[in-house]
Structures are given as structure tokens and as C-alpha cells.
Amino acid sequence: MKTKVLLIDDDLKLARLLTEYLTRFEISLATAGNGEEGLRQLWRDPPDCVLLDVMLPGQDGFEICREIRKTSGVPVIMLTARGEVADRIVGLELGADDYLPKPFEPRELAARIQAVMRRQHPAQQGELVKCGDLEIDPSRRSAHRAGEDLRLTSLEFDALLAFARHPGTVLNRDRLMDMLKGGEWEPLNRSLDVLVSRLRQKMGDDPQRPRYLKTVRGTGYLFLGGREDDAQE
């Protein structure tokens, strides 16, 4: 069954190239030349993944990503011509699952799409994970706290599940980046910190008195499993 991907980008030459190229990977590409048109297509015929250019006419890609995340958890891969770390961090803060600097090789884009789809539909689902008032369902790829849906993106869900499956264990950055393989992680940028910050916000977890995610300075993060930690970070 083909993967349905929506490309929101005003580069018509790129759209034609990718439409033809991605068919060999069982990827069907729909295109939109601006954000408003892209949003209309997304609501009318929801795709499996969105490719979203940052530099769009009218509303830029960041604004469109914000609109998408108000109602949808569809995986979003942001495309940025500048490739700046700041752009990538903003994208992750808004809920993007991955980013790819332009120019890129079409084969790398295909690999990124396949990676986010594997995260969205893992081969081994696993059993329900319960930690305090937090409930994580790998089969549905959903997480609830006190019965409220956390509305996590694909990348946020994978990170939370990785933490929850290793309670009481400090996960260093290298190990976390390996667990979340498929995204482009750079040890010296803030991408991982941004991801953890988004998880904390959605769970309502106070970083000064955490119940779920504690920062271990200079090392990584510790999943507390729902108990309040007495020590400050």
C-alpha cells in the first residue's frame, strides 16, 4: 500500500522531480504551492506524512506547522534552504518530527520519510505501559495522563516510550539519539533538549520538581515513573 505524502513547497521544479522519483519507493506525492492550499488539502485528504518548506509565500512553514499541530499529529518533515540550527530548533518546538536542509538528495528524503513512517507504525508494538497517572499505548501510539490525551507527535511519542521503558535508568544523550534514530541529531545542538522540554510541557511536569523527567546534569535524563523527585535539577 502506497504511503501518501503531501509536499507544501512553491518550488515547482522540485515538486515535479520528487513526484516522479518517490514513486519507486511506493510513495504517492500530492503537492501544494503555498500554506493555505496545503492546509486545505491536508484536511480534505489526510496524508500519512507532510513535507513542509520553511520559506513559503504568505504564511511561512513555521506558521503552517503550528496550524497543523492544533488538530493533527501527522508526521511533519520540515525542509529548510538555510539549514540553520535555529530553524531546526524552532521546527521541533512547533512539533516537527524531522528536518532536512536544502539542497538534498531525493534518496535521503525517501529514507527520512520511511524512517518517520517506521516510527509511526513499528513492527513490534508491545504492551500497555503504566507509570503513575501516565498511560502509554504502543499499539495505538497514544499517551494519556490522568485520562487526558497528550497529543504527542511521532517523535515525542517515541522519546516518551523510550524513557518509560527504562525507568530509574539514566539515559545519556548518545543512547537517546541512537534510540531515536531516523532523525538528524547533532550532539552540540539543542534539538534533544527541545524535545524533552515539549514532553514536559505536554505532561505538565515541573522541571524543578519533576515527577517524570529529571535532568541529570552533564549526562542525560532520568525517568522517575510518576513519583515526585525531592532533589532539584
Image: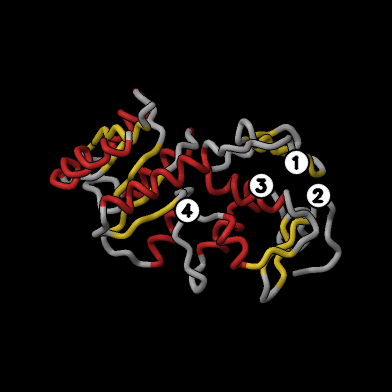
The residue that appears at 35% across and 56% down in the rendered structure is 100
Q: Label 1, secondary structure: give it.
A: strand
Separation of residues labelled 1 and 4 (CA atoms):
26 Å
The label nearer to you, 2 versus 3, is 3
Q: Mark 3, residues whose alpha carbon is within 10 Å: few (<14), some, or many (≥20)? A: some
Q: Please, is residue 48 above or below residue 79 in the view?
A: above
Separation of residues labelled 4 and 3 (CA atoms):
16 Å
Q: Mark 1, residues whose alpha carbon is within 10 Å: few (<14), some, or many (≥20)? A: some
Tell me whether the residue at label 1 lies in contact with that at label 2, contact meaning CB atoms closer than 8 angstroms: yes
Tell me whether the residue at label 2 lies in contact with that at label 3, contact meaning CB atoms closer than 8 angstroms: no
Left or right: where 35 falls relative to 46: left
Q: Disc 4 residue type?
A: Gly
**Mark 4 or mark 2: which comes first in sequence?**
4
The residue that appears at 26% across and 35% down in the rendered structure is 23
Left or right: where 190 falls relative to 114: right
Q: Give the residue number, with chain letter if any, for mark 1.
A: 134
Specify the color scheme.
Answer: secondary structure
Q: Give the residue number, with chain letter if any, for mark 2.
A: 226
